[in-house]
Image (tube, grey):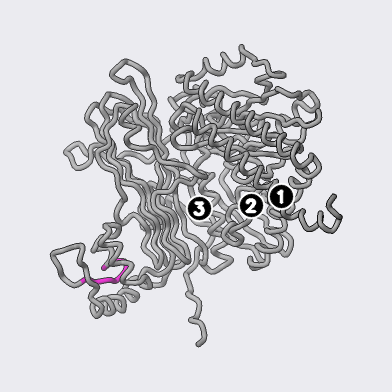
């Protein structure tokens, strides 16, 4: 038998073992969904999450930043038994955890010795659950009833027996019932695996050890924030605002640009993000019915860079607090439409970064817009109705220490859809796929590059476009420039070339039409004139940056040559050019929002209620 002294010494090791087993269980759940789901957006692009929660419904594993079991716990109380499986997607009955209807959530209790010790969940963006448009994300919806079937928190299985009428009703509301059936069954099987793994951990190490580990995981997150992160952030209040685009989508909604604003207040004990000043809810579907505790956990991810080993879970709520005005775009009242809450979701990250940039004088990452998507639906050559959906990646933000990553997706562990898969199962042909030159915002560390993708459409159908930052570019920081905006084009480089709107539910296409996808680049960080000329040369050789941008943005001039792969920097000409550029361009901006933004600002189409300020570089270190 181990002595007390030995036991104390082993407890940290035991904690690591149990934590690792829980994380392994969560990953196994997601792998099960990847292997067995049916819709492309779930199986091919990994638009799903798994999570493990303590018996009170608090998330103890990473990455589950949305759905929570608390609606089940509060609604069913003691009426929960082994073999029960719960399902819901109702945004207004999910405690802020589900924020648009395509995110169907399966919840399963974990019983040990006859009592609930934990909960497991899987939720994911299924292909279609009805509503006004295929895919169930209509931009022009003005109430949630137009967005698909709403499932309140209900028992799907009761002690192992499935509610067949409920199952049939859910499937009956989808344009693609077989896809939905495959996805829901995959979620259930994954939850069964997760519940079994939690029970196995209890059997191996004891219920008390597992529950103590849950508490320690929550406490560690709070402690990391309080002891590591908070001391790094200067005390004070810092404001920033950014915008979502909604021009011309919903005729009854006159607002073109939707303001999101936050004041970050840092004290010795906590961080508060107050979203007062954010626009009231809108007529269209860009509302986000989250909860203040969910927003706090979401904003907590901003501080991973301060403590890279920190695991974000519900312990965040002990240190970070959010204040969200009722009736705002971040807290709309039922039955506000919310299918495209994606854009305010991304924008509050930018708003949080902007606040941190004020606190740190610009030493934060720049902006990025890493979720755009297109869809194509119609009837294939066999007469079957189909929907092709793809979430396209975009350029990541330039950082104070590195360039942004290319063509990334904001969703954790997301994947792109292989071109071979799209061509094999849908009536399309991929004509071109590569990186979009010059899309990354210039900087000491440039923004990442977006996609260039040309898709030939082989049938008559309808294209759906969902993208932000088509007008308002991802901003650069600390003297870095804004990234290139989103561009959709139909039949480029032909007499019928047409630039398409950033957002649209219905664009008719014919066989042979080509859709060009130019996804945005990330904002740059730091003065482009401080970028290493050799790094610029390498970017030009790799066709990531043009010779023109190298000269105009970076001040780098090359020796004349007929071989683009044997470029050589003209050091004297580069030095002279870099000395001339500062006088012509004026002071550096703390935040560069892009040329179009400043045009709209001058025209009165958009207003700023806070000052961005200039970037003042720190003095060089003393020798």
The residue under the point 47% across, 32% down is: 43
Extreme bottom residue here?
623
Q: Nearest the camera: 568 or 262?
A: 568
Quick check: can you spot residue 162?
Answer: yes
Nearer the N terminus, badge 3 or badge 1? 1
| SS for dot 3 | strand
| Disc ID at residue 197 | none
User: Is 613 situated above or below 247?
Assistant: below
| SS for dot 2 | loop
Q: Residues within 10 Å of mark 3 (few under 14, many from 20)?
A: many
Whole-percent x, y for residue 258 in the image: 50, 45
Q: Is residue 358 left or right of residue 467?
A: right
* Magenta-drawn segment: 551-558
Pointers 1 and 2 in contact (C-beta within 8 Å) = yes
Q: Is residue 254 left or right of residue 231?
A: left
Nearer the N terminus, badge 2 or badge 3? 3
Extreme front residue here?
1
| Disc ID at residue 242 | 3
Q: Nearer the viewer, mark 3 or mark 1?
A: 1
The residue under the point 36% across, 37% down is: 418
Q: Is residue 319 left or right of residue 554?
A: right
Q: Nearest the camera: 455 or 20?
A: 20
| Disc ID at residue 217 | 1
Q: Nearest the camera: 416 or 111?
A: 111
Residue at which label 2 appears: 311
User: Is 246 situated above or below 142?
Assistant: below
User: Is 448 situated above or below 460?
Assistant: below
């Amino acid at each position: 038998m181990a002595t007390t002294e030995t036991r104390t010494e082993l407890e940290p090791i035991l904690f690591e073992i149990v934590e690792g087993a829980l994380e392994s269980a969560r990953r196994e759940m997601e792998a099960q969904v990847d292997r067995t789901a049916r819709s492309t957006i779930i199986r091919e692009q990994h638009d799903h999450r798994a999570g493990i929660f303590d018996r009170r419904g608090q998330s103890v594993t990473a990455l589950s930043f949305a759905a929570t079991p608390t609606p089940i716990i509060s609604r069913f109380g003691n009426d929960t038994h082994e073999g029960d499986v719960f399902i819901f997607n109702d945004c207004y009955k999910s405690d802020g955890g589900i924020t648009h209807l395509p995110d169907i959530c399966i919840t399963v209790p974990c019983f040990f010795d006859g009592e609930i010790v934990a909960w497991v969940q899987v939720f994911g963006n299924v292909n279609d659950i009805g509503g006004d448009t295929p895919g169930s994300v209509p931009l022009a919806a003005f109430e949630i009833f137009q967005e698909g079937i709403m499932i309140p928190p209900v028992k799907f299985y009761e002690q192992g027996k499935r509610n067949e009428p409920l199952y049939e009703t859910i499937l009956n509301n989808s344009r693609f019932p077989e896809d939905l059936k495959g996805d829901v069954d995959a979620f259930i099987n994954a939850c069964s695996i997760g519940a079994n793994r939690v029970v196995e951990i209890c059997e191996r190490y004891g219920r008390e050890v597992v529950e103590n580990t849950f508490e320690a995981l929550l406490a560690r997150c709070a402690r990391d924030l309080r002891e590591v992160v908070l001391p790094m952030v200067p005390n004070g209040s810092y404001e920033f605002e950014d915008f979502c685009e909604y021009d011309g989508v919903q005729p009854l909604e006159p607002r073109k640009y939707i303001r999101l604003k936050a004041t970050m207040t840092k004290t010795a004990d906590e961080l508060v993000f107050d979203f007062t000043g954010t626009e009231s809810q809108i007529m269209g579907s860009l509302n986000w019915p989250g909860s203040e505790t969910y927003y706090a956990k979401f904003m907590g991810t901003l501080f991973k860079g301060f403590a890279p080993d920190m695991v974000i879970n519900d312990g965040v709520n002990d240190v970070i607090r959010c204040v969200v005005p009722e009736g705002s775009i971040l807290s709309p009242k039922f039955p506000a439409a919310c299918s495209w809450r994606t854009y305010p979701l991304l924008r509050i990250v930018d708003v949080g970064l902007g606040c941190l940039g004020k606190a740190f004088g610009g030493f934060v990452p720049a902006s990025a817009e890493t979720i755009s998507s297109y869809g194509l639906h119609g009837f294939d050559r066999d007469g079957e109705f189909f929907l092709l959906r793809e979430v396209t990646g975009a350029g990541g933000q330039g950082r104070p220490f590195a360039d942004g990553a290319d063509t990334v997706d904001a969703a954790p562990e997301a994947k792109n859809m292989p071109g071979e898969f799209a061509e094999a199962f849908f009536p399309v042909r991929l004509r071109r796929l590569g990186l979009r030159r010059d899309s990354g915002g210039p900087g000491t560390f440039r923004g990442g590059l977006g996609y260039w993708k040309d898709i030939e459409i082989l049938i008559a159908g309808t294209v759906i476009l969902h993208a932000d930052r088509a007008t308002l570019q991802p901003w650069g920081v600390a003297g870095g420039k804004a990234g290139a905006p989103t561009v959709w084009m139909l039949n480029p480089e032909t007499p019928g070339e047409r630039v398409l709107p950033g957002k649209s539910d219905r664009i008719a296409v014919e066989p042979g039409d080509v859709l060009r996808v130019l996804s945005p680049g990330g904002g740059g960080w730091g003065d482009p004139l401080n970028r290493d000329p050799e790094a610029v040369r390498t970017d030009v050789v790799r066709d990531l940056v043009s010779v023109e941008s190298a000269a105009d943005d970076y001040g780098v001039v090359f020796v004349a040559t007929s071989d683009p792969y044997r470029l050589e920097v003209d050091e004297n000409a580069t030095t002279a050019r870099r000395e001339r550029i500062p006088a012509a361009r004026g002071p550096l901006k703390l935040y560069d929002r892009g040329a179009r933004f400043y045009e709209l600002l001058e025209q009165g189409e958009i207003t700023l209620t806070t000052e961005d300020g200039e970037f003042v570089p720190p003095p060089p270190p003393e020798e």
